[in-house]
Amino acid sequence: MGRLLRLAVMPVVLTAALLVVSAPSAGAQASRHEAEYAACDGTIDSNHTGFSGTGFCNPPNQSGTGVEFTVNAASAGTVALGFKYANGSSTSRPASLSVNGTVVQSNVPFESNAAWSNWTVKSMTVSLRAGANTIRLAADSGDGLANIDYLDVANSGTSLPSSFTWSSSGILVEPKSDATHDIVSVKDASVVYHGGRYHVFVSVVSVNQGYGLAYLSFTDWSQAGSAQLHFLDQTAIGGGYKAAPQVFYFEPEQRWYLTYQIGDNVAYSTTAHIGSPSTWSAPTPFYSDTPQIVLDNMGSGQWLDFWTICDSANCHMYSSDDNGNLYRAQTSVADFPNGFSDPVIAMHDPNHHWLFEGVNVYRLEGTDEYLLMVEAFGDSGRRMFRSWTSQSITGPWTPLADTRSNPFAARSNVTFDGAVWTNDISHGELIRNSIDQTLTVSPCDLRFLYQGKDPDASGPYNLLPWRLGLLTQSDSTC
Ligand code: GCU
Ligand code: CA
């Protein structure tokens, strides 16, 4: 976040009403249930190749016969099912799916795959209750069921645990002034790892409370503190208010984008060479004006902290307004950077401090799952991050670790390698495992470059002494 001068003093008021606790989503891992351990109405055969485990279930060729699995769920929620089957007959063998004794889908086709040794996975989605569930597949025709090898159960929140602990580095990046830039903080980091180097873009705030952008690059974190700070007002990006950068490589155009707020709008610059700060282009605004929906909803807040992520079809720009609204706008990958729609409100909280700013959205590697993080005010007004997941880049977003008692990242779930140099876990970004516009992170290797500040610091927000540190997840389950 980079706040305009008119918002220089932020109230740090929190009430007991904030202490809302919602249940974390299911965090169970994907699980495989072999048919040989399930209740099979027929025989466990092994006379056709290609099965997993020791065999497959071959129910008799009668309507109503089938196979029943027992599946334990850590908590109630939606899960994806995958039945591996073979149907060597020439016609489909439709089946009904029951969960806990109730038919939830009937006449699901299990199409012919031409040979009994050809196997296919049939996918469907069901809701499970917490604890034991029975999942039964039964034939809808006299031909009986296909041969069933196993059932895979993938929870919608499978890739990440439902709670987190982190260890923090000490301060890695501090402000470095030069003859024409007298700065008090480095903040709002965006980072990619490319060509054997970290490339970090930050907001810098000067003693007169003006915001600009800066860039630094280094080979490993031990070098971050000695890296030169390049002030981007010296480039075509130019002077004046610029803040909260995000960097990514837009693969379709084979060039880098830097997006940032410019006061009442969001703009981008591009370059082919991320390591050469002088090559960034002049700012081009994404919008002609602040969209009406933002003006209508931002109250005394500010439109800020723009975050773009794309899938194969569309690019989505998330943003906040410090007034409890998370916005999302959309354009096609083909049209990007043009054509962004007016934003829609993707999420709202009546307590603006509980859905504040600093949004990040990532795709989790190897899944179709997305992680959303939003900065909020935690205990004693300390900054923290809440998190959600979704099977869709557009949401809806299911709470993951989103409470004060179970935060994504906050003082309460961070330990420090050395001295506790901050109580705030504020605006930053996860270390991605790719550079492109899909913003992919590995759910097994979470690291978060964040901003923190001296716990004793006080005064106007814009003069707070923000520095950068790195969180490393300490309870990874994989
Ligand atoms: C064949 C095949 C079996 C299959 C059966 C059927 O007998 O070998 O594996 O279950 O056809 O039609 O159901
Ligand atoms: Ca059979």
Image (tube, rainbow, N blue to C red):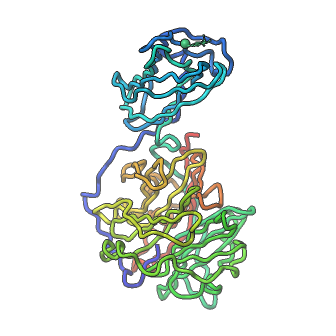
Residue at the right extreme? 195
Q: In this view, does 471 lie above or below 59?
A: below
Note whether residue 478 is visible. yes
- Hey, which quadrant is residue 201 in on the image? bottom right
Please provide percent x and percent y for residue 114: 64, 23
Work out whether 25 lies above or below 412: above
Q: Where is residue 391 in the image (x, y as percent from the top left)?
A: 48, 47
Q: Nearer the viewer, residue 144 or 80?
A: 144
Q: Position of residue 253 (x, y in %)?
A: 67, 68
Furthest residue in direction bottom, as rendered: 180
Which one is in front, 267 or 260?
Answer: 267
Q: Which residue is drawn at 31% across and 71% down?
A: 297
What number of labels is visible?
A: 0
The answer, for residue 428, to whether it is visible in the render is: no
Residue 325's x, y, as percent?
35, 65
Farthest residue to the front: give it. 90
Residue 367 vs 83, above or below: the answer is: below
Place residue 100 in its image quadrant: top left
